Amino acid sequence: MAYFHLKLVSPRPGFPHDATPDEMTAMQAHAVYWRGLAESGVAIAVGPVFSEGGAFGIAVVEAADAAAAQALGDNDPVIKTALGFRFETSPMPSIILRTSAAGAAAAV
């Protein structure tokens, strides 16, 4: 298994502050999807980031390979809606987890 960073890029810089009703519905399904992946242990951390250049989402996941990590993004309901969201997937060659997140201190 390996670790990957997925960055969810929104359709425009003003998102989510100018989200349409369809986008908000898609984001609710997106949250349910990633909550399930977190509960199953696939997703290590998931959440929004509000930066000066605009908001984006992040997920740190454990997957067999880059294709499996990309498939997690491709299967996100917000991607399937074709509303202009996309994922950028990057490998993480190592990861350090705090004890409470890993179950035991780990550095991989």
Image (cartoon, helix red, strand yellow):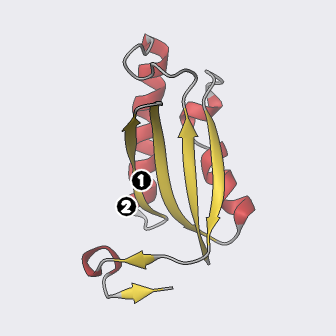
Question: Which residue is nearer to you in this view: 63 or 33?
Answer: 63
Using the image, determine if residue 73 lies above or below residue 79.
below
Residue at position x 61%, y 25% in the image:
81
Which element carries disc 1, helix, strand or loop?
A: helix
Residue at position x 41%, y 21% in the image:
24
Using the image, determine if residue 50 lies above or below residue 69.
above
Residue at position x 38%, y 46% in the image:
47
Q: Residue 64 at x, y = what percent?
A: 66, 72
Question: Which residue is nearer to you in this view: 41 or 55?
Answer: 55
Q: Residue 100 at x, y = what percent?
A: 25, 76
Question: Which residue is nearer to you in this view: 3 or 93?
Answer: 93
Pick the quarter of the image with the N terminus.
bottom right
Q: Residue 99 at x, y = what percent?
A: 28, 81
Marks counted in the figure total 2
Residue at the extreme right: 67
Q: Are marks 1 and 2 in contact (CB under 8 Å)?
A: yes
Q: Which residue is mark 2?
A: 39
Packing grade of label 1 (10 A; few <14, some 14-19, many >=20) is few
Q: Which residue is mark 1?
A: 36
7 lies left or right of 52:
right
Which element carries disc 2, helix, strand or loop?
A: helix
The amino acid sitting under disc 1 is Gly
Kindly indicate the quadrant of the structure image that contains residue 3: bottom right
The amino acid sitting under disc 2 is Glu
Q: Distance of mark 1 from mark 2, alpha carbons? A: 5 Å
